[in-house]
Image (cartoon, rainbow, N blue to C red):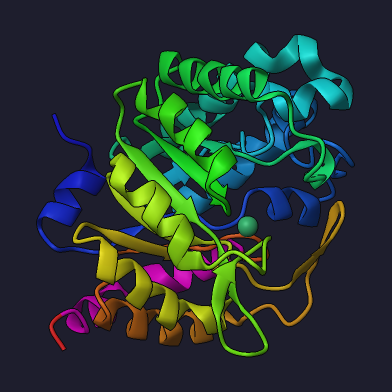
Amino acid sequence: MENSWQQKLAADEIVLLDGATGTELQRRGVPMDRVAWSGAAVLTHPEVVREIHEDYIRAGADVILTNTFGSTRQMLEPAGFGDHVEAINRGGVELARQARDNVGEQAVSVAGSISTEPPAFEQNAYLSPEEESAAYREAARLLADSGVDFIALEMIVDTTHATRAMHAVLETKLPVWLGVACRKTDDGRIVSFDYPDLEFAAVLDALIPMGPNVVNIMHSEIGAIPEAIALVRERWPGPIGVYPESGYFTKPNWNFVDIIPPAELVTEAQGWVEAGVRLLGGCCGTSPDHIAALKSAIPQLEAARST
Ligand SMILES: [Zn+2]
């Protein structure tokens, strides 16, 4: 049987994702690890992780992402959690499934989140290529074995590490969501969120041909999104999602400054839907209030589809 997100996309309906998990943990008092960020919270604060999932399901999310963004061996081992990689990845899926059971929304899908982030977000701290690929394969296998409905690659900002991760997650044979992150430079170019010299289009050209099921513009600046959608659309006829960030990061903490009000997110989302976007949610800085606002606006957003 198809998952409900696939049925909704087939019917040209809007699929609602959750909002931030990592920054929401921080907002609820869970300290962010300097090396693995939110990666160990499944082990250290499972009840808060489950509560956040439950809140997003109650807000109306069709899809929730496991709190495993920072849970590859690449991030967990240098943070001192190398012996817990399996427990954290399996536990992350279990908490999401428990949340779904607790709220009683069995149609909600659970996505296994994997990022290509290096420890402490230090770009010179990646493992060797072989070890790095093995870390992505390990995470993908653990998430798949634990029963995720599909894999969501997140924070894809380059071509080298991203292609390693993409190869690894495709081996699971599960559907794959490609989450690419961009920003706009002062001179108006759309570039990788982390590498201002790398055109966003180059990331898309390297990854889209590998065969994702959905392309999400995630953890990106709201001001960059209309142009990013156009760049994706030129290259990708399939489903496009948007889940932006709001606020800014100072390692290892999020700064909840100038967070977009939920009603303004709805207004922005209307334009994205008009441009062809069918999956909506939030990344860092957003909360269940943002997802609830989008949920309330689904009729209005779906009315914007054909315009
Ligand atoms: Zn984010």
- The residue at 51%/19% (across/down) is 137
Position of the N terminus, as image quadrant, is top left
Q: In the image, residue 254 lies at what x, y percent?
A: 80, 61
Q: In the image, residue 44 lies at what x, y percent?
A: 80, 27
Position of the C terminus, as image quadrant, is bottom left
- The residue at 62%/81% (across/down) is 260
- On the picture, is 191 further left or further right than 78? left
User: How many marks can you see?
Assistant: 0
- The residue at 74%/13% (across/down) is 84
The answer to whether residue 212 of the structure is visible from this angle is no
- In this picture, is 187 found above or below 276? below
- In this picture, is 178 found above or below 43? below
- In this picture, is 250 found above or below 6? below
Q: Is residue 300 magenta?
A: yes
- On the picture, is 114 further left or further right than 86? left
Span shown in magenta: 287-305
- On the picture, is 89 further left or further right than 178? right
Ligand 1 is found in the corner quadrant, namely: bottom right
Q: In the image, residue 59 lies at what x, y percent?
A: 46, 58
Q: Nearer the viewer, residue 124 or 111?
A: 124
- In this picture, is 66 found above or below 16? above
Q: Quadrant of residue 34?
A: top right
The answer to whether residue 103 of the structure is visible from this angle is yes
Q: Nearer the viewer, residue 121 or 146?
A: 121
- Could you tell me what secondary structure mostly forms the magenta stretch? helix
